[in-house]
């Protein structure tokens, strides 16, 4: 039975890594395609404008410099639109390890599930309203946090791996998320979904 569980866990982890790799490859391909299309349109527009002005299609050195600057600007726009952030495999591994530790050390399955659900609520709230400061700040004295997350080994570590940092604000110790990364939040949500739904999560 132990070998079967280990084999199932290995298959599940391989599939998860494969999905993550495919998502990164797809996002990179979308970015590159969009970039190529944008550059193609810019080149066509440039040639058309020069033909209308009776100018040769070849650019002067000054014009080439101006075009290069414009391309940098358009590339930056594409990056903002599609995103080019690659989540380090280590970050995903650390988040998973925190959740596995939580499940293994929880006093009961119900306690682990409650912690996972609370962490999922934190993650979803930030994903829905990333600019809302109250969702990016957790007081250590908050009762829900203390009794559902911080009482479990690995709970606070998961939030730290997500990007939260310990701060003292108005005399109170808090966990604060300064920089919101949609891709990291998405990865965290995927791991929490797996922890909540997979009977093999954390089982060795």
Image (tube, rainbow, N blue to C red):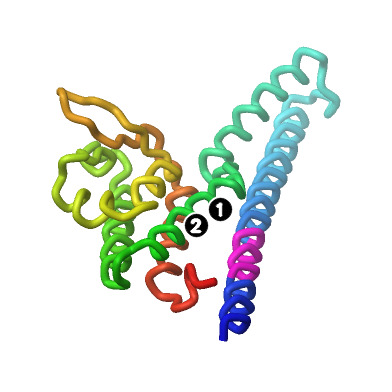
The residue stretch that appears in magenta: 13-22
Q: Quadrant of the C terminus?
A: bottom right
The percent coordinates of residue 176 (x first, y second) are 31, 35
**Main secondary structure of the magenta stretch:** helix
Graded by Cα atoms within 10 Å as few (under 14), some (14 to 19) or many (20 or more), the crowding at tag 2 reads many
The percent coordinates of residue 168 (x first, y second) are 24, 25
Of residues 82 and 89, the one drawn nearer to the viewer in this rendering = 89
Residue found at the far top of this picture: 62
The residue at which mark 2 appears reads as 96
Q: Check if residue 151 falls in the magenta segment.
A: no
Q: Quadrant of the N terminus?
A: bottom right
- Disc 2, SS: helix
- Disc 1, SS: helix
Q: How many marks?
A: 2
What residue do we see at 74% from left, 17% from top? 65
The residue at which mark 1 appears reads as 93
Graded by Cα atoms within 10 Å as few (under 14), some (14 to 19) or many (20 or more), the crowding at tag 1 reads few
Of residues 63 and 141, the one drawn nearer to the viewer in this rendering = 141
What residue do we see at 76% from left, 34% from top? 47
Q: Are marks 2 and 1 in contact (CB under 8 Å)?
A: yes
């Amino acid at each position: 039975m132990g070998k079967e569980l280990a084999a199932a866990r290995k298959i599940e982890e391989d599939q998860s890594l494969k999905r993550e790799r495919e998502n990164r490859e797809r996002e990179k391909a979308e970015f590159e395609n969009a970039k190529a299309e944008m550059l193609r349109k810019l080149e066509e527009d440039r040639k058309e404008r020069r033909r209308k002005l009776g100018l040769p299609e070849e650019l002067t050195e000054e014009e080439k410099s101006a075009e290069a600057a414009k391309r940098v600007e358009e590339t930056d726009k594409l990056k903002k639109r599609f995103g080019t952030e690659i989540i380090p495999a280590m970050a995903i591994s650390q988040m998973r390890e925190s959740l596995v530790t939580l499940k293994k050390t929880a006093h009961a399955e119900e306690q682990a599930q409650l912690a996972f659900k609370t962490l999922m609520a934190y993650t979803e709230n930030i994903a829905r309203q990333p600019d809302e400061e109250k969702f990016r700040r957790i007081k250590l004295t908050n009762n829900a946090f203390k009794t559902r997350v911080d009482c479990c080994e690995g709970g606070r570590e998961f939030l730290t791996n997500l990007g939260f940092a310990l701060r003292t604000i108005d005399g109170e110790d808090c966990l604060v998320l300064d920089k919101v990364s949609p891709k990291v939040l998405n990865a965290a949500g995927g791991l929490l979904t797996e922890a909540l739904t997979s009977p093999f999560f954390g089982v060795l």
